[in-house]
Structures are given as C-alpha cells and as structure tokens.
Amino acid sequence: MLEAGSDFVSGNDLAALLEISRVSVWSHLEKLKDDGFEFEALRNKGYRLKKTPSFIHPDLLNAYLWNNNTSLPVIYLEEIDSTNSETERQLANNHSTPFAVITGKQSKGRGRHGRVWYAEDRGNAYISLGFKPNFSPDLIRSFTPWIATELCHNLVLKYHIPLKIKWPNDLMIYGKKVCGMLAESRIDMDGIRDIVLGVGINISGNPETWPEELQQKATSLEAACKCSFNINEMVAYILSIMLNAYNQFINNTWRIAFEKNWPHYDILYNKEVNGFHGRMPVEGIAKGITEEGSLRLLLKNGKIELLDAGELSLSEPINNKLKIEHNV
Ligand code: BTN
C-alpha cells in the first residue's frame, strides 16, 4: 500500500501477495488500526492507506527502509535507558554490524560532555548505529561533522527545511537545536574496535511539554516548520543517509562532498564566538573547519587557532531566518 501511494490495492491482490485469505487481510488491517493506521476501503476498489502512526512503528519503519533499498537490521525498543548503551551491549554480545537500535523514549539519554539528553517525547527519534570500522583513530574527529553534513544536506533537499549545522555536529533550525550526535568509540592497540553513533532528532515532539530551560534552546522540526512529517518515513530516510555516509567515509570518498557542503550550512561562519576550549576561555571569529574537523578561530591578535570539539557559544544570537538564503 505504501508503494501504491494514493491508488487503491484490491483485497484479492493483498491476499494473493501475502498468501492469506481476504478475511485475514481485513483482520490484519483492523489490528493495524489499533496502532494508529487508518485505511480507506471501497467496494470493488480495495484499500488505500490514509494515515500512518505518528510514533515510530517498527514494521512501518522496515517497510520504508525496504522502499529505500536500505538493508539494515533494526532493533526497536519501546523504551530503553540509552540507545548508545544498548548498542554497546549488543556489540559486546558480538551483534554483526552495521545495525541500528531505535526507541521513542530513553530514561538515561546521554549527550556530549557528560550531559543528560532529554528524551521523553515519543514524537522524537533516538537512534544509535553500531559499526566496526577499519579506519585510523585520527579520523574520528571528522566523522561526526561529516555525518551531520550529509544528514543536513539530504534533509534540506528532501524536505526543503532551513537546517544549519553548528560545529561540530548539531543541526539547528531558526537558531534552535533539533538534532544532536554522540559518537562513542572503543579504541585499542590495533585501532578502532567499534563505534556507536547516537543521534537524537526532534521530529514531532511538542516543545511546550519540555523543561523550560530546554525550550529556550531546542525545538522540534514540526514546531519550527509548523507542518507535519511522517516520522517513520523520515527515520528510515535518516538511517539510509547515515549508512551511506558511513560507507563513503570508510571508502574514503567523502572529502569532496564535505568540503563543498559544510560551508553552505555552517551557522557559525564569520560569527563572533566565545566559550571554552577545554578549560581555557576562547574568543574569536569562526572561519570554517579543517578537513580534520577542527574549528578555525580567528583570534583578536590575527592568529588562527584550531579548536577540537570544545564548547562554543555565539556572542550574539543568530537570526537564522535571515540566513536561510544561503542554504542550497
Ligand atoms: C548532544 O549532546 O548534542 C548529543 C546528543 C546525542 C543524543 C542521542 S539520542 C540517541 C543516542 N543515545 C544516547 O544516549 N544519546 C544519543
């Protein structure tokens, strides 16, 4: 029915395809209604899909992945402490890679710099991918800026939304954060053992129900764009982008697209920024990033300092609405 779009699919065709009776088709559809699906049924025409669930539905997600030609095992959990922790546990149990762990609710979501990632809103998606890559640990710093660039670029192209990237890997909309990434890796003498790439993306969550402090700096795509998104289709799309981006990274075919696309989305470019680099206060004008993922900061003394993923904030808030035009 997803493939048929707005066309009807006959009960006979569905029954033949699934090798079940027409009555069974009907009773399966009735069950799916309890999960938030809505179907239109017309005598002599059959069924068509009218509405899909507004929360992550693992079967629907798999159907969209299949439509995207993405082959990725997905472990879906109604609720979990943290998808990054679950991915680590799966990797410790030798789960074959790559694979994804997805939930709509985390009780102990982790953010960067040891922060807590608020993950109570089921309209959002909390995703981790487990990889066993074969690249040098030196490249890890550019891994998440690259994934963020691909995610941003492809979401902008498909959904025409004014996303930006705040170094090193936050996705922003109208100056507020909608997506954060946390990559955790185990490295030993032989190199990288595994990487867990966690992404939290606020899709249809309602910021009004979030803690006050969070509402000041974060939002959801639906709240910011005042429109609705099909969460299962979007999550499947995000998974396929991340998997493609990962493959480009390990095949070393990512650099040209990275150099071309990062500047389009760089929200900090030419902005005065201040904050901390480790424990050192820093202040300067952001001048893009290096291929290694470090931020170029023009200091008051005219020198360029390269910053690793420290914490930066803007000296003045950005009116992102005025900046949309330099999205591609
Ligand atoms: C950040 O601080 O911006 C990074 C946030 C990363 C959150 C995601 S949600 C899915 C995955 N599981 C976690 O516990 N954290 C990451």
Image: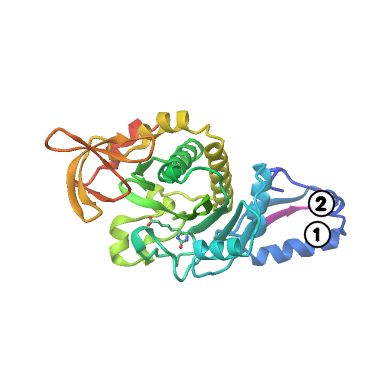
Residue at point 36% right, 47% down?
Answer: 172
Q: Quadrant of ligand 1?
A: bottom left
Residue pointed to by mark 2:
14
Residue 79 sits in which quadrant? Answer: bottom right
Question: In screen coordinates, is 241 left or right of 317?
Answer: right
Q: Residue furthest front?
A: 189
Residue 25 numbered tag: 1
Give x and y (percent) for residue 8. Answer: 74, 46
Characterize the local packing of mark 1: few (<14), some (14-19) or many (20 or more) Cα atoms within 10 angstroms. Answer: some
Residue at point 39% right, 47% down?
Answer: 169
Relative to 212, say whether 39 is above or below.
above
Q: Report helix, strand or loop for mark 1.
A: helix
Query: What colouring does the structure picture have?
Result: rainbow
Q: Which residues are magenta?
A: 38-44
Give x and y (percent) for residue 70. Answer: 65, 44
**For marks 2 and 1 on the same chain, the one whose residue lies earlier in the sequence:** 2
Residue 215 numbered tag: none
Residue at point 64% right, 42% down?
Answer: 68
* Front position in the image: 221 or 201: 201
Question: In screen coordinates, is 208 left or right of 130?
Answer: left
Residue 286: say if magenta. Answer: no
Give x and y (percent) for residue 122. Answer: 50, 64
Mark 2 residue type? Leu
